[in-house]
Image: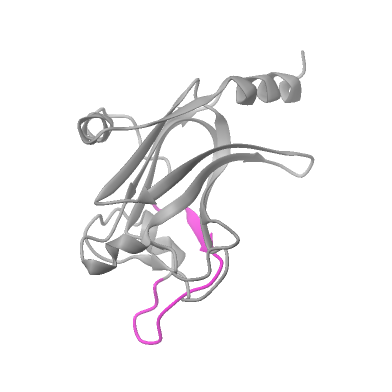
Amino acid sequence: ESLIDAVVSDYKETRARKLTPPEINQVLESGVTNVALNKAASQSSTYGKVYKRHAHNAVDGNRKKNMAHTKPKECGPWWEVHLGDVYDIQAIIIFNKKDIFGSRLGDFFIEVELKDENFSLNAHVYSEGRVKKQFGVSYQPAPKGNVVRVRKLEKTCDSPLHLIQVEVYGTLAK
């Protein structure tokens, strides 16, 4: 069995599950490494004239301030982090704004992608409805990935995508 066949098989078997607040806290306190911390990130556009809301703000380790923020009225905005190496992704936790604009984060996909020059595989989960403070998802078995993406539906043109922090928990793939 080739690596590609094995990975495709793993992706077919992967199941994602939304985490409860206590389960999110368990992940945060588990000692598993946030493999997205300070990694290269990009997004579909950047909002802000004075305070630029760059993509890297969502992986700077600050769960209270700074944010990644796309421009308003953009259809299908997205944000992604490039992990560099390939990881077994166990969980992803997104921290949202706590003010009145926090209601903008909803109806989005979280995608784990294994990408190289020859192929791309994707394991995704859809979050329906609005996120309050945090949103977490766990995977079983853990998909292999080197890119994690958060994106709104293509038809979503009424609100930007903003993320305070995106934390990706996993271990280096073997």
Question: Which residue is rendered at x = 42% and y = 62% of the image?
Answer: 56
Outermost top residue = 1
Q: In this orientation, does residue 159 appear?
A: yes
> Residue 116, how many percent across, how many down?
71, 42
Q: Nearer the viewer, residue 60 or 153?
A: 153
- Left or right position of 55 against 31: right
Q: Nearer the viewer, residue 106 or 51?
A: 106
Q: Specify the quadrant of the image occupied by residue 4.
A: top right
Q: In this orientation, does residue 37 appear?
A: no
Residue 43 in magenta stretch: yes
Q: How many marks?
A: 0
Q: Specify the quadrant of the image occupied by residue 96.
A: bottom left
> Residue 42, how many percent across, how many down?
53, 62
- Left or right position of 49 against 10: left
Image quadrant holding the N terminus, namely top right
Question: Which residue is rendered at x = 53% and y = 69% of the image?
Answer: 157
Question: Which residue is rendered at x = 40% and y = 53% of the image?
Answer: 38
Q: Specify the quadrant of the image occupied by residue 48.
A: bottom left
> Residue 94, how many percent across, how many down?
35, 48
- Left or right position of 1 against 56: right
> Residue 158, how many percent across, how many down?
47, 71
Main SS of residues in magenta: loop
Question: Magenta stretch?
Answer: 37-53
| Residue 50 against residue 19 in the figure, above or below | below
Outermost right residue = 118
Residue 27 in magenta stretch: no
Q: Nearer the viewer, residue 47 or 42?
A: 47
| Residue 174 against residue 18 in the figure, above or below | above
Question: Which residue is rendered at x = 76% and y = 39% of the image?
Answer: 119
Outermost bottom residue = 49
| Residue 165 against residue 18 in the figure, above or below | below
